[in-house]
Image (cartoon, grey):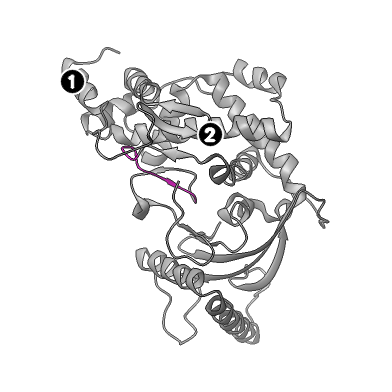
Amino acid sequence: MGRPRALVAVVAGALLLAGCGSGPSQVGAAAIVGDRTVSIDQVQTLIDKAVREHPYAQKLAREHKLDLIGRAVVSQLVLHELLTKAADKAGITPNYGEIDAQLAKDPLNGQVPADASDETRAVSEVVTRTRDHREELTDNNLAQMLAEKGSPDLSVTFDYTSIGSMPNSDGSDAPQGPAAKKAAEDLARQFAADPAAATKRITTDVQFEAALRQQAAQAGQNVDSIPPLTGLGEVLPAAQAGMLAATPLYGSPVGSVTVFPYPNREGTWFVGVVRQRADGKPVATERTPSLDAATKTAIGMRQLQPLFDELGVRVNKRYGVWDFVGMNVVPNQDAAEGLVLPSGGSAPRQQ
């Protein structure tokens, strides 16, 4: 499909990505990952290719929203570099036979239509299909292999509470929507600034939840199927954690306080304090659940989080900042999916 001249003009301007803000010191770098650089030229080349090939990207160009494509490109290329380094460190090589078999099916064939309804998913698919097919499949393969190798040797001890589902211990209703996220982040900042306050608050919440469950049981309700919303000193091997193993609870250092959407509990925010990590030695498990490919990929991607500090990853601020919860680039910290706060501090982690 040819591009109208007006669209070409839109793309030419949008490719500049509003070169405001200072970034990494190296000229022309969109991101720096250790000794590797993702160049601005690489990013713009993929944006241009996406607009040529995908109606959805053409729609974004007309709406002056190609910054969405740019951030997704930087995100995927940074993760690619991290996966390469993590696999090398772990002594993992791709399963080329499996990759060839998937490539033969051409899973990334076709355009992303302009009428795709889910913007976040559509943008991700545009970038995925615009990149080299083999490279994208290799990334997923390495992430799954990292999950398979790392999960049996990792467990985390943590304290946590939840915002959004359980009424407040003072009897008031739980906050909802954006107010719930803000309340969770405010609470996390309190925990990071005062660890003793975290223990006190979570102890109160645990007792309150126990009382609520007792009341529900006395009323004849089945409470066994309801996931717990609070806990002290919980020890959970990654192999038993399911989607929770794909959250920053399993990627953040000891002492960190993190906020993220509670998996499979819409509208609920998980506020957790990482107390201890057991990494690199076997962890006894009752039963290892069967995980689908998407979950294993997400768990493997989470294991890249510690490499950010180790490699000193930096993202050019013209694209945004790195969200340690979403593991991608977002316009600013307010757009992040949650928070990861260092021990003793209340400022979000920055790349």
- Disc 2 secondary structure class: loop
**Going 39% across and 27% down the picture, which residue do you hit?**
112
* Percent x, y of residue 311: 55, 39
Comparing marks 2 and 1, which lies closer to the viewer?
2
* Percent x, y of residue 197: 53, 79
Q: Nearer the viewer, residue 270 or 195?
A: 195
Between the residue at mark 2 and the residue at mark 1, the CA separation in whole angstroms equals 36 Å
172 horizontally vs 217: left or right: left
How many residues crowd around disc 1 within 10 Å: few (fewer than 14), some, or many (20 or more)? few
Location of mark 1 (residue): 9
Q: Is residue 118 visible?
A: no
**Residue 288 colored magenta?**
no
Kind of residue at disc 1 = Ala
Determine the image quadrant of residue 82.
Answer: top right
Determine the image quadrant of residue 102.
Answer: top right
280 horizontally vs 115: left or right: right
* Percent x, y of residue 141: 65, 30
How many residues crowd around disc 2 within 10 Å: few (fewer than 14), some, or many (20 or more)? some
Mark 2 or mark 1, which has the lower sequence index?
1
Kind of residue at disc 2 = Gly
Q: Is residue 52 above or below residue 228?
A: above
The span shown in magenta is 317-324
**Going 65% across and 75% down the picture, which residue do you hit?**
222
Q: Is residue 61 visible?
A: yes
**Magenta-colored segment: predominant secondary structure:** loop
Q: Is residue 240 above or below residue 78?
A: below
* Percent x, y of residue 125: 44, 31
Determine the image quadrant of residue 219.
Answer: bottom right
Q: Quadrant of the N terminus?
A: top left
Location of mark 2 (residue): 34
